[in-house]
Image (tube, rainbow, N blue to C red):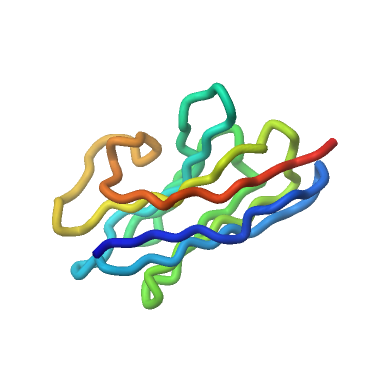
Amino acid sequence: QVQLAESGGGSVQAGGSLRLSCATSGATLGWIIMGWFRQAPGKEREGVASINFDDRAQYADFVKGRFTISQDAAKMALYLQMNNLSTEDAAVYYCAARRADVGWWSGSPLLRNAYTDWGQGTQVAVSS
């Protein structure tokens, strides 16, 4: 059974930092893309950052220079270092992954349709 589990969310003041983690299991052939999404109340879920199996990363414009995505392929784990957080970053953050057995995705990796599996989310709150 494929599972993704986020951790590391919490409450910080504006300007602070958090590091999110995503532990994965059950993908027998591994992942070819992993990503982070977020959803604030009343808003659509949006792509934040993604990373391919070859460590190529992409970021949404609104997090460039502040967030860093990374992975540990051996552990099949995903991370998101978030620095200089603002109140606009407050949301539920979701880990997502595309299993290797479904084939490559040729579109933007910041789109929801790129992914086959999702975590349950972790809350990030930012106070001013």
Figure quadrant of residue 109: top left
Residue 69 higher or lower than 73, as above or below? above
Q: Assign the N terminus to one quadrant of the image.
A: bottom left
Q: Is 40 situated left or right of 112 in this image? A: right
Q: How many marks?
A: 0
Left or right side of 95 for 15: right
Q: Residue 44, percent across and down?
A: 47, 25
Is the residue 52 above or below the residue 73 in the image? above
Q: Quadrant of the C terminus?
A: top right
Q: Identify the residue shown where x is 56% and y is 56%.
A: 80
Q: Position of residue 56 (x, y in %)?
A: 40, 54
Residue at (82%, 45%) from the top-left corner? Answer: 13
Residue 25 pos. (x, y %): 33, 69
Find residue 112 and report its image quarter: top left
Q: Can you give x and y, in whole percent of width and height, for residue 69 in the image?
A: 52, 55
Of all residues shown, which one is farthest toward the bottom? 74
The residue under the point 74% across, 37% down is 86
Single out the residue that lies furthest toward the top: 42
